[in-house]
């Protein structure tokens, strides 16, 4: 069965802001929460659907990917199409969101001392336009939290182990009765972990993790554009208590080129054309993004601003294999300078060239001026 649109699930417009998203989620989560619908399997599924929609749309990076690619944005990074990655229990994420929106003491709280998924990481990568054209294999160094080796990630010193918290009896949360309601909050002694460390590891100070720089190889596809991101599933921060690792998102920024401007798969450049070549016709040579050269035929009588297209000389398409954009060359006719006396005399002979055949643009402009002045005089006489 195909998934419903996340905006439709929450009943909000596609331009809804964070406040509107949160308000819609609060109402629907309260309506379909399992504690409010005991034994209602359909309500439980709707609660999960609402949780997944809000989990994606409240995350700026995931929302941007969803807006651009829909559910397909999460189909190629592992996890069977889940927006949370492989090895992640969505219910843990939904419960975390529910607690953030309603508070840790909200109804239906669950234990949070179990495995927790690691945080996602972001890495900004700059590449040149030529690198974007060819694609490349890039090696990056990413600082991230990894399990502490001496304590194997437990946080406890060698020869000891974390002990069950005696305040919450290992549940990570404590309850208190307030009138008709049972309020639940994070255990203040173990911070929701359910365990306490009497003898912390000297290497990590009891955190169970240390910071380390990892070297990763990333394949940048040919045709990548600024703003695109590459997801490396499971290369984010390590989870706690055996939780799954987060993901690493690489955001690509293609720096501006000295010659070419890019618009999607097409490239644009401006090329000077000698005045004589523009008048008589001929050829000019321009560079191409692949490092080669291309000859451009200049038609006789070419004017500044005219664009000529070179098919297949643009950027490859990252989405459509085998398709390549075009290169558009905009001409500007260059007026010669520092002429010799003889050259000036030769050019003066062009002054005798007049009329629509020699200067069609000038003749057309002069004609419009004459009509403007004639109409202006007619209005003055009429008044």
Image (tube, rainbow, N blue to C red):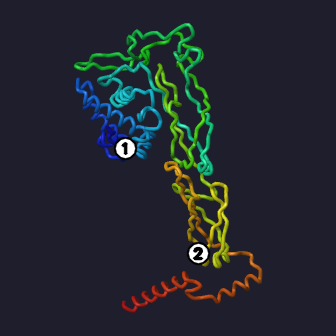
Q: Picture quarter containing residue 180?
A: top left
Please indicate whether residue 195 sits to the left or right of residue 20 in the image.
right
User: Is residue 193 or residue 238 the one in the foreground?
Assistant: 238
Quick check: 11 above or below 374? above
Total labels drawn: 2
Q: Report the quarter where the N terminus lies.
A: top left
| Mark 1 secondary-structure assignment | loop
Sequence-wise, the earlier of marks 1 and 2 is: 1
Please indicate whether residue 219 sits to the left or right of residue 370 in the image.
right
Structural distance between the alpha carbons of marks 1 and 2: 49 Å
User: Is residue 137 or residue 321 the one in the foreground?
Assistant: 321
Could you say where residue 312 lies in the image, as x and y percent from the top left? 57, 59
Q: Picture quarter containing residue 105?
A: top left
Quick check: 340 above or below 243? below
Could you say where residue 140 lies in the image, as x and y percent from the top left? 61, 36
Quick check: 203 above or below 55? above
What number is the disc on residue 17?
Answer: 1
User: Is residue 272 or residue 173 the one in the foreground?
Assistant: 272
Q: Report the quarter where the C terminus lies.
A: bottom left
Mark 1 vs 2: CB contact within 8 A: no
Could you say where residue 103 lies in the image, as x and y percent from the top left? 35, 27
Callout 2 crowding tier (Cα within 10 Å): few <14, some 14–19, many ≥20:
some
Residue at position x 58%, y 67% from top?
330
Callout 1 crowding tier (Cα within 10 Å): few <14, some 14–19, many ≥20:
few
Could you say where residue 3 lies in the image, as x and y percent from the top left? 33, 39
Residue at position x 36%, y 34% from top?
52
Of tags 1 and 2, the one toward the viewer is 2
Identity of the residue furthest to the top in this view? 159
Residue at position x 47%, y 25% from top?
244
Find disc 2 in the rendering and name its residue: 303
What number is the disc on residue 267?
Answer: none
């Amino acid at each position: 069965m195909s998934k419903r649109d996340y905006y439709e699930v929450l009943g909000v417009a596609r331009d809804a802001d964070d406040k509107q998203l949160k308000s819609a989620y609060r109402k629907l989560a309260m309506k379909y929460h399992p504690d409010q619908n005991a034994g209602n399997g359909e309500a439980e599924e709707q609660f999960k659907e609402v949780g997944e929609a809000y989990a994606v749309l409240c995350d700026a990076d995931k929302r941007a990917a969803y807006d651009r690619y829909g559910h397909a944005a999460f189909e190629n990074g592992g996890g069977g199409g889940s927006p949370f990655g492989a090895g992640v229990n969505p219910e843990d994420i939904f419960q975390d969101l529910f607690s953030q929106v309603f508070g840790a003491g909200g109804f239906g709280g669950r234990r949070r001392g179990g495995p927790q998924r690691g945080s996602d990481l972001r890495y900004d990568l700059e590449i040149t336009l030529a690198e974007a054209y060819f694609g490349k294999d890039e090696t990056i160094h990413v600082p991230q939290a990894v399990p502490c080796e001496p304590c194997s990630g437990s946080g406890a010193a060698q020869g000891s182990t974390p002990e069950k918290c005696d305040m919450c009896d290992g549940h990570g949360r404590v309850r208190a009765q307030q009138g008709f309601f049972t309020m639940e909050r994070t255990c203040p002694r173990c911070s929701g972990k359910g365990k306490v460390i009497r003898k912390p590891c000297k290497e990590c100070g009891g955190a169970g993790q240390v910071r380390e720089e990892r070297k990763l190889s990333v394949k940048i596809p040919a045709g990548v554009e600024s703003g695109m991101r590459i997801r490396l599933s499971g290369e984010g921060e390590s989870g706690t208590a055996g939780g799954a690792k987060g993901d690493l998102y690489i955001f690509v920024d293609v720096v501006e080129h000295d010659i070419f401007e890019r618009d999607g798969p097409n490239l644009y450049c401006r090329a000077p054309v000698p005045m004589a070549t523009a008048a008589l016709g001929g050829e000019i040579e321009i560079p191409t993004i692949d490092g080669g050269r291309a000859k451009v035929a200049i038609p006789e009588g070419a004017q500044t601003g005219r664009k000529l297209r070179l098919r297949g000389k643009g950027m490859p398409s990252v989405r459509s294999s085998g398709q390549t954009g075009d290169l558009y060359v905009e001409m500007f006719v260059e007026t010669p300078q520092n002429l010799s006396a003889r050259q000036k005399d030769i050019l003066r002979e062009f002054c005798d060239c007049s009329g629509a055949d020699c200067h069609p643009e000038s003749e057309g402009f002069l004609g419009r001026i004459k009509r403007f002045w004639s109409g202006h005089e007619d209005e003055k006489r009429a008044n």
